[in-house]
Each structure stands twice: as C-alpha cells, then as structure tokens.
Image (cartoon, helix red, strand yellow):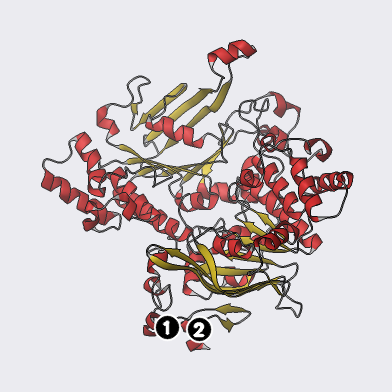
Amino acid sequence: MTMKPMVSVTNARKVFDVSQPWLERVLSGQDKQMLVAVDDVSFTIKKGETFALVGESGSGKSTVARMVTGLLPASGGKFSIDEVALDPKHGYPLSLRRRLQMIFQDPYASLDPRWRVGQIIAEPMKAFGLARNEDEERARVSRLLTLVGLDPADAIKFPHQFSGGQRQRIAIARALASDADVIVCDEPTSALDVSVQAQILNLMKDLQRDLSLTLLFISHNLAVVRYMADVIGVMYLGRLVEVARVETLFAQPRHPYTRMLLDAVPDLAMTGRSRQPVQGEVPNPISPPSGCTFHPRCPLANARCQKEIPLMIDGVACHAVQEGRKA
Amino acid sequence: MTPESVKTPVLELRNLVVEFVTRHGTLRALDGISLSIAPGEVLGVVGESGAGKSLTGAAVIGLLEPPGRIASGEVLLAGQRIDQLPMEELRHIRGKRIGTIFQDPLTSLDPLYRVGEQLIETIRTHLPVTEQEARERAIALLAEVGIPAPEKRIDGYPHEFSGGMRQRVVIALALAAEPELIIADEPTTALDVSVQAQIIAVLKKLCRERGTAVMLITHDMGVIAETADRVAVMYAGRVIEIGPVRDVVKSPKHPYAKGLMGSIPALDERPERLLQIEGSMPRLTAIPEGCAFHPRCPHVIPKCHESRPVLEHVGAGQVACFLHEVRS
C-alpha cells in the first residue's frame, strides 16, 4: 500500500506555561513552570479510516486534536492534511480549511443558543461561498438535516428545542455542511446516554461509509473505540505508548499500560475474566516521572525504565516489550 | 445471589410517588416505585438521564429538593417508616444508619477542614467514643479504604488528595458510623477507568465484610455487572425490570432493557451495528399514557397505549410489560 496518508502528524509537541503571574513569581523567587502536555506524538491516518486516540484524563489526547485542526498553536512538530502542511503562523490554506471540521463533546456549548438551526448549518457554506443563492442554501440545509436523521422543518428551531442527541446530530450536519472529508471528533458521545450514543455512533459510521470520511476520534471509552476505530493510538501522559490496528490491540495488547487499561474496564459480558485492579493513579503532569513516565505503575519496570524514555519501535514504546522482559 | 430472604429488608420502598408542584402543574417524577434491599445485598439502580434513579436515592434519605415531595407511598428502613419523620430525626438517621457517597468527592468533603477532623466529627456525632478513640478509628478506616500512610494523611486537607483518594475518603466517611445501608449515587463516574476499578473493589469488599446493604445508582452497566447482586432498571420514573444481575444483563426481558443492553458497545466483540432504540426518554411534562415506553417500543400492542403494565414475576425477576403477561 503506497497510498498517501490523509492526515499526518509528526513529532507533535505542546508545552503550556503554567507559571504564576510574573510579579508573584519574582517575589517568591519561583522559576517558570512548564507543563509538557504532548510530546513526540506521530501518527498517520489513511483516507476513509478512523484513527482513535484513547487515554485517561490529562493524557493529552484533546490537545493533539486541537493542534491537528490548527485551533491550538503547536510548540513543535509538523501537521498536514492531504499533503497540505499546516503553517505555524497562518494555519491551513483556505482551500483546505473547508475540508477539515470538528465535532465537540458538549452539544450544549458548541451551538450558539441564539441562532436558528438553519443558520448554524448554513454558516460554513456562507464562510466558504458554497451556495450561490438562498434557495440553494436552504435546499442544502434540508438535505443535511435529512442526512443526519432530522426533519428539514427543524431548520427554523433553536438549539434549546432539541435533546442532547439531536443537538449532536445538528453539530454533525454543520461539520458536513462545507463538504468536509476530515472530521476531528473530540469525545462526541461522552455527554450522551448509552441508547443515544448508539444512535450517534451508528450515524457516524453510516456517514463515514457513504461519504468516505476520514476521522480522528478522541475518546476515553475503550468499548466505543473498539466499535468505531480502524487504528488506535494509546496515550499516557502526553506520549503515544502503543499504536495498533483495532483487532490486534484488543487481541494482543503489548504495552503494560494498554493491558492495564483493558483490564480496568468493567466486564459487561460477565465472562468471569479475572481482573487485577490497577495500582496507582496518573501522576501530576507538571512533574512527570523520569524515563518512561509509566514506570512507577508498571509491573515490568526496571532501572533502565527509570532513566531512559522508550522510543516508539514497531508500534510500541516500551523497554520491557522490546527486550522481551516478562514479569 | 440473594433471594427474597425471610429477613426484614434493610430498605423497602412501597409504591413511592414523588411529585414536583410547578407552574405548569404537578409533575410526577417517580411513579410507584417498589423495591427492597436485603441485608448485605448490593442493588444496582440503572437508567438513563431523567429516569429518576438519583431522585429515588434522594427520596430515601429525605433530601428531595423543593418543590419535590413524597406524594404517597412508604419508605421503610429495617421495617420502620422513615418518610414521615421530622427533619431532626431523619438527620440523625443519615450518617448513622444510612451512609451516602456522591459522584463528586469535593462536594461531600469540606475543603476548609482536615480529612481527619471530618471523619472524627462524623464518628463522634454518631458513636459514643472519645476524641482519641475516634482518631484511632478514623486512621483504621483510612487504612481500610486503601490510603497509604493513614496516620500522616489524616491531617491533610481534601485538596491534597487526588480524585481517587478523595473518593476513598468519602467511602471512609460513609462507613464511619457503621451504617446498615449505603446509598452510592454514581460513585465512580467522575473517575478515570483505572481508578474506577479500584474504588469499586474497595466499596464492594468493605460492604461485604460488614454486611452493609448498598443501593448503587449508576448509568454504567459495566459497574453494575461487576458489583450488584440484583438490578432495577428504571424508565421515566418507573421500575420496568428488576432481577438478579446475571439475568438482567445477559438476558433482559423488557424491550427497553433489551435495547439498553444492546446499545452498549462491548470490549470483546465488534458488531456491524449497535442495537438502536429510536427516540429518547420522554420529558416529565409529556410522559406517554399507558406504558411510558410504548412510543419507542418495537413490540407495541394496542393495550400498551391504554393501560400501564405492573411488575409481574417472570423467571427469577419481575418485568413490567404486557408481552410477558401474554406469554405466561
């Protein structure tokens, strides 16, 4: 397969300055405090596939998503969509921006409450000059509403007249309004109930198949990711620790953290699979552990893990796996 | 696991109705809830937002926010009615006989007091012990819930603890006065999965050791499957199915319970499509006549529009659905 990747991220890095205000810092003699939220993250997504980033809170997955879309300036690294690079100063060129859209977690915050649904969905068309006149615009809005399972008559309503699931459908319609083919979804169903989540996940899969969308899907829920993703990247404290195709990752998780995460998910199938409660919690990212940041919680850690940051080799960043070390 | 035992249930709800009197009329948020929890049993209460599961917990401990009120029905704690007790007496029961754990540990802990002070206060309010005995007890409790170096940590403030550690402190607080019943409302929802598993394990172990009954309210079926003995599934303010956890999770009988279980993505398989229930939970202002689920139900029959099904015994559990009445 020599197909060019649709989305490419190389050595992404983001550092946040979390210092006290200058005066307080000087008075109390503190140094600047830096939080490395994302470090050395690289991955590619093929056209029409879904790449999922999973991890616990503070792992940096949303930060990656916001850097890929250009919403958040990166501290380092290269980003490109369909071989068009993100310029650190000017973002993506206009021709590409149309093709890249985002869906957010909270459908109550992502839709302007004072705009009618029709206006919300027509906004990207206006921004990119996609409709020649108002009739065409209305016709497209109707088509989009039907596409996401709403009624064209809903265009004159306001967001508050819809439930959470319906609002997320509106957000999807808006994302598709500019004929986008790369969609970044940041926890799109985390705020929804399970039965509504199923509706939205099914809708997203259908749309992906019909419109050959490329998705970057951010989630903390492994079961959702298992349903949606083709390739999964597992993040821990700002770094990718394992990247694998979905079947491989669930059948043979390799990184100790991936195994731990899979182990921690409650067993709904009630197979009686033995579960080891995970030890410890995610450390404070301001002062992460040395070497491999997972070493204090890792059952396989040794002296090397405390000193050396493991490199991503063949889909896994772990000294123990690379050395073939066993517990 | 635990069948309807001959012993008096720790908690029994009989036809509990909770109403909110508003400008738009009287809204019925809980409509005839009947259930019981045996000593040492964990009853899971599940449902989606708006089903009334948290309200059920709040009604038991007398913490309904006005204008919510218990309109009819009974709440019995160890066979004794508590729904009509004056506030003062109920306040004493909360904490002493019923412990509570809420979703956000920061709302249960006072940020201005050391963890130890809060534990000691709770212990001394409810048990006749000296300050020194209470402190020793508090340290022992912190050790039991898995807080390392409890003799040091007892003098820490809540903000010095991580999210998971705080929830452990809240569990210690809930257990401090040796209650008969714990009401845990979404105790792990605010936590990361790896920490969730730890908290559930601690809660389960301690309640089992002490024989404390637990009402575990959550929307997370995974947590229920792992922890509960029996499960009650709620929809639009009603219990629509209740039974042993294995039956309800593996072979639910009510069409809503079936849809709910089928719509949860699983870890060990990848279906082509997730099972999907059309529509969403009705609002309180517009609960359908008859069976509240009928507009969304794939198996609806004319009778469902008119009359409301009651819980009937089906197998080891109970289901409120005419389909099962017809069959049996």
**Which residue sits at x=84%, y=44%?**
B135
Tag shown at residue B324: 2
Query: If the image is split into quadrants, where does the C terminus of chain A sit?
Result: top right
Percent x, y for residue A22?
54, 14
> What percent of the width, then of the height, locates residue B70?
55, 69
The quadrant in which residue A44 appears is top left
Is residue A201 visible in the rendered image? The answer is yes
**As rendered, which of B108 and A80 lies closer to the eye?**
B108
Which SS class for mark 1? loop
SS for dot 2: helix
| Residue A196 screen position, x and y as percent | 42, 58
Q: Which residue occupies 46% across, 47% down?
A: A229
Q: Chain of mark 2?
A: B
Identity, as a three-letter code, of the amino acid under mark 2: His
Give a yes or no on whether discs 1 and 2 share a subunit. Answer: yes
Marked residue chain, label 1: B
Q: Residues within 10 Å of mark 2 (few under 14, many from 20)?
A: some
Which residue is denoted by mark 1 in the rendering? Answer: B307
Tag shown at residue A223:
none
In front: mark 1 or mark 2? 1
Residue type at tag 1: Ser
Asked if residue A191 lies left or right of residue B115, the reply is left
Q: Nearer the viewer, residue B33 or A327?
A: B33
**Are the two marked residues, 1 and 2, in contact with CB atoms closer than 8 angstroms?**
no
Direction from residue A159 to residue A139 in the image, left or right? left
Q: Is residue B236 visible?
A: no
Query: For this rendering, which residue is in front, B209 or A288?
Result: B209
First-in-chain label (1 vs 2): 1
Instruction: Measure how far apart labels 1 and 2 are at the Cα level.
Output: 15 Å
